[in-house]
Image: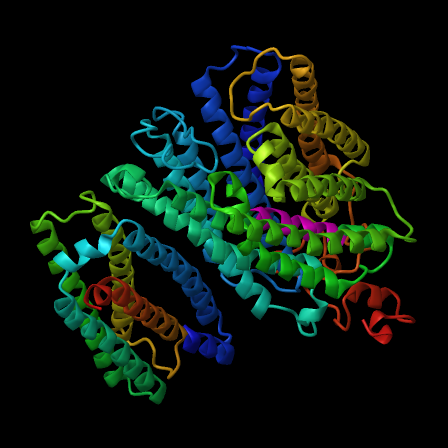
Amino acid sequence: METEVQLAVEGWDNNKLGMLLFIISEGTFFAFLIIAYVYYHSTSHTGVMAAKVLDPLRTGIYTVFLLSSSFTMWRAERNLRRGNSPAFRIWLLITILLGAVFLAGQGGEYLHLYGEDVTVSRNIFGTSFFTLTGFHGLHVLLGLISLGVLFALALKGEFQKNHSSAVEAVALYWHFVDWVWVVIFSVIYLWTVF
Amino acid sequence: MYLLASLLFFGAGGIEALLMRIQLARPVNSFLSPQAFDQIFTMHGTTMIFLVAMPVLTGLANYLVPLMIGASDVAFPRLNAFSLWLLVLGGLLLYFSFIAGGAPDAGWFNYAPLNEKAYSTSLGIDYYSLGLLIAGLGSIIAAINLIVTIINYRAPGLTVRRLPLFVWMVLVTQILIILALPALNSSLAMLLIDRRLNAHFFLPVSGGSAVLWQHYFWAFGHPEVYIVVLPAFGMISEVIPVFSRKPIYGYEYVAASTVAIGVLSFLVWAHHMFAVGLGHSVDTIFAISSMLIAVPTGIKIFNWIATMWHGSIRFTTAMLFAAAFLVVFTIGGLSGISLASFPVDWQVTDTYYLVAHLHYVLFGGSLFGVFAGIYYWFPKMSGRLLSEKLGKWHFWTMLIGFNMTFFVMHLLGLMGMTRRVYTYPDYPGWGALNMFSTIGAVIMGISSLIFIWNMVVSARGGEPAGDNPWDAWSLEWATSSPPPPHNFDRIPPIRSRRPLWDLSHPENPDWRNGN
């Protein structure tokens, strides 16, 4: 989150500042869900169940997809600033695809877990696991929709100026979603290994 | 619009309060059934906090902040409308529960596991969760809007050190909102998942934790107390200097103590949970941090008194409410310190002593501040002055009714009368004190009607206000009353904290004296 704070201090643009405040608020929201997961991990020993049913390697691969989408988003912004709008559009599209792959991966994982009768109502592990990852998935989906809107606007010839605070605000949000996942992945998946 | 919505809900919440007082007027009364009583006290608390106090303050801030900083509107006007409608939708959902088989009935803080499906089978709590979730999102969006406005839309020369104190306090409040509301939203989301998807977050029988709900709720709930009281502090900080004809005493200290309150408010939540049994060391830490809050609050009280000291005070209705605020809020603050000491809290928690305390700070603090603010700014909004004669009737009946209703609750609490119980046995003195309290509530009800009547009559036929009826000094009084849609035609130069004083006193402007 620190890098984002620095960005806003440079800019003070309305959209970016508003997005930054929204991200702070959402970050707090996730902090509470993460604390709940950690709390049940220690009081109700949900880690045992997590180690049994989760596959850190598989999800790890999807994590790489999501994290690299942060990189491609950054590339897209760079190209927009240079005035290279075809490259901007391509990097944006790649970002969307990477995000979609991640989301599909999460969907697959959910289906697999349901197949093994691990559900939100089965026990407290299911409850805290699906809530936390589900809310993250929802945020990824929102990010994808926003990116999709940007892409559609880009195809219609918007963003000819080499600066768009809308793009920068959505990019901030996208990086935020990625970094939250790093924390969630560590807490849920890496904890089962280490 | 915000003000109208909150006035409407104020009516609903007030009627609920009166229903309760009628039930409690006599021992072993049967006016309300226990079930109805549970629903009504829950709805009264929820309504007053979320649908009255928060929107009235957001509404005033929305209207006044742009005017006070010399902006034409908030940063995101469309988002502003969106957050208003979210609030209205949330409120309507909450009230729809009455029709849909039963209102929520587990108290405004809705403790687990009482809030779970097994223990509260009607749909009330689902509506509570959904309604507050939606209204909460609206609050967060409104907060973002106001913060961006205050940071980016200040008129040239209006530095942070010259910002009116109301704007300062609104800024701190909005920061509290974006950090505290997520705690409520996340726990509401978890509760909904529990209730609708049969999950286990707050169910101790299947590995969940009921205490976690309490932690999360109060992690939101205590900052929330300051969210509804800080803007009122801000209004008091505007009203008192203007009617004392003196600049605020210790501007920096008032502003800095606001920030201190904001920070401390996140560190005291467990003082609501002394009776849970968190252990001696935890209780001690939270007792100390809670008492610490008295320090910045005390600084403010002293600064306001020092502002009045040797001032030439004009006792308009606005000033009367501000002065009464100082007294009743201090009483509420003092009973607050006694509650922060956990041995005392163990004795009186969930008695009427607590009810007295919270009404002295929220009603006597927040609402008296809002009344002062409305008498002060109504002329700016409508172009007409509120009737001072009706205003004085409103003030005195309110002050007397308020103290009659809530002061005796201290005594009842110390005698051991528990709150949230629909009736009580006929112990010596209890019936008389409760009757006294109920009469006070009826007086407050009449007083509120006088207030509404005053607004209706004055908006139509009140004395025209002119641009600056109080001879005040902040920017909102530089434009016409009511202001044009773009707020300002011309903004006076801002070289100090009191731009309009500088304008009318070119021989002795503030900026020459280093303010």
Given residues B34 and B382, the one toward you in this image is B34
Residue B204 vs residue A68, the one in the foreground: B204
Q: Position of residue B55 (x, y in %)?
A: 55, 45
Is residue A163 visible in the rendered structure shown here? yes
**In percent of the image, x 46 and y 65: which residue is there?**
A21
Residue B157 on the magenta segment: no
Instruction: Name which quarter of the figure residue B509 lies in.
Output: bottom right
Q: Name the residue at 46% across, 15% down.
A: B33
Res A107 seen here: no
Q: Residue at x 22, y 72 (%)?
A: A66
Q: What residue do we see at 54% from left, 25% from top? A: B16
What secondary structure prevails in the magenta region?
helix
Q: Which residues are magenta?
A: B225-238
B414 vs A105: above or below: above
Q: Using residue B458 as the reference point, say whether residue A77 is left or right of it.
A: left
Question: Could you say where residue A101 lies in the image, as x and y percent from the top left?
Answer: 15, 68
The quadrant of the picture occupied by the N terminus of chain B is: top right
In this orientation, which residue lies closer to the viewer: A123 or B229? A123
